[in-house]
Each structure stands twice: as C-alpha cells, then as structure tokens.
C-alpha cells in the first residue's frame, strides 16, 4: 500500500497539487482494529518513497514506521469514521486554494452541469448538483476534526471538502476511487477558477 501511495503522491506533485511539503495521503489497512497508513510530516511529495509513511491506530498513535505522522491525521481518521473511507487524499492546489477563498462567505459552492461530475461515485448525469462545503481552517487539529465531522454529517452526499485558504480533502471506498474523486474535483475547481477569470459573476 505504501508503494502505491508513494507513486500517487509523486504523480500529484508532478501535477502541481502538492508542492513543497504540502499534502497528505492515507489508506485503511484494517478495520478491526482500525489501522491506517499515512504520510510522515514534512516530506517532499516529489520524492515520496514507501519508507516515508507511518501506521496509526484509531487514536492517531504511531504503531509502526519512523517519523511523525501528518499533523492532519485527525482529519483523515474523522473521514474514516464518518464516511467509512478506505482512503483519504489531501492536496494544496492553486485552484482549490483560490476557490476556497472566493466562495468562503457562502461556506461552499454548488457545482453542476459538467460532464466530469459523472466521475464521482453514484453520480449518473451531468445535471447533478454537487455541494462542495468550505470549512474555516484552524491550526487546532482536534477542533478542526470536530468541525469536519459536523460538516460531513450535515452534507452526507458530498464527495469532498475544502479547507479555506488551504486545499481539498476527498476520499473513496478504496484508493483508486479516492484518486478518481481527486482528479474529478481538481479538474472542476480549475475549470471554475479559469471560467471566473473570463466572467467574474460565475
């Protein structure tokens, strides 16, 4: 699993979605007891290797691997608990950051009419309306995890969440579904952002 996560991380870096040491990725290794694998903190995703991951238990304690887990591990665990996610991917793309600021006053944005929406699990038509919630960022991760859980319960159909001025969180039943959701949502956010440059009313 670590090897596949590392390969995906390097590809996301190549797309400009996790520059510097930004972003973090996780996958569920077992449910009972809960064990996840997640990127170590502060690693360059352009050179990410299978050795730069740690295993965590349900409380976020390291049980295998070296290094510190991502500071946002609590958010990954919240998504696993509330959504039953098998994998969680977090990127810091330019467009997700811009859009999260542009729509922050409305606490989210509706996305509709795009064929790419059909890449989201359960969506069968481009006429689908997808609500992408936006949460105010906070350096207090336990507090932010509580906020995230509340938003997830309020919007059970959402496939992703934006942290304001920060980036995109998305997930899936497994790693390949999470990857698909990430690619779809990043495409849609870039499309909306570029469209706004031509028409600020969008």
Image (cartoon, rainbow, N blue to C red):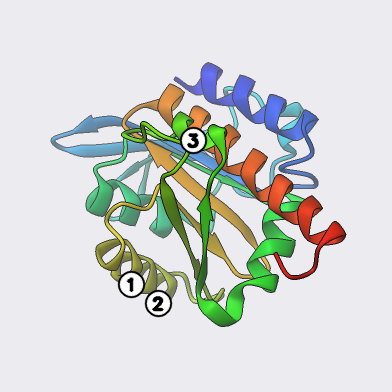
- The C terminus sits in image quarter: bottom right
Q: Which residue is mark 2?
A: 143
Number of residues whose C-alpha sits closer than 10 Å to that of mark 1, classed few (under 14), some (14–19) or many (20 or more): some
Horizontally, residue 43 falls left or right of residue 119, namely right
Q: In this picture, is 200 found above or below 42? A: below
Say whether disc 1 or disc 3 marks the residue closer to the N-terminus. 1
Q: In this picture, is 197 found above or below 201? A: above
Q: Which residue is mark 1?
A: 146
Which residue is located at x 72 percent, y 42 percent? 17
**Label 1 secondary element:** helix
Q: Tell me, for residue 181, which label it has, or none.
A: 3
Which residue is located at x 86 percent, y 58 percent? 198
Q: Position of residue 174 (x, y in %)?
A: 35, 27
Horizontally, residue 150 falls left or right of residue 163, namely left
For marks 1 and 2, give the CA distance.
5 Å
Q: Position of residue 152 (x, y in %)?
A: 32, 61
For marks 1 and 3, give the CA distance.
23 Å
Total marks shown come to 3
Say whether disc 2 or disc 3 marks the residue closer to the N-terminus. 2
Horizontally, residue 165 falls left or right of residue 39, namely right
Quadrant assignment, res 62 = top left
**Label 3 secondary element:** helix
Q: Position of residue 130 (x, y in %)?
A: 44, 52
């Amino acid at each position: 699993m670590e090897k596949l996560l590392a390969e995906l991380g390097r590809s996301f870096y190549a797309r400009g979605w996790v520059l510097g040491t930004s972003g973090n990725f996780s996958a569920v290794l077992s449910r009972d007891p809960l064990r996840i694998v997640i990127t170590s903190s502060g690693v360059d995703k352009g050179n990410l290797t299978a050795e730069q991951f740690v295993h965590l238990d349900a409380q976020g304690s390291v049980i295998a691997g070296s290094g510190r887990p991502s500071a946002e591990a609590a958010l990954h665990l919240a998504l696993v608990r509330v959504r039953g996610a098998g994998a969680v991917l977090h990127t810091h793309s330019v467009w997700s950051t811009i859009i999260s600021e542009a729509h922050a006053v409305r606490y989210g944005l509706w996305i509709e009419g795009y064929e790419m929406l059909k890449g989201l699990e359960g969506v069968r038509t481009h006429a689908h309306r997808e609500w992408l919630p936006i949460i105010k960022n906070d350096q207090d991760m336990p507090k932010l995890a509580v906020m995230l859980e509340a938003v997830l319960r309020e919007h059970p159909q959402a496939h992703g969440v934006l942290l304001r001025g920060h980036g995109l969180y998305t997930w899936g039943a497994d790693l390949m579904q999470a990857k698909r959701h990430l690619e779809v949502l990043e495409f849609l956010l870039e499309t909306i952002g570029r469209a706004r440059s031509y028409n600020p009313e969008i």
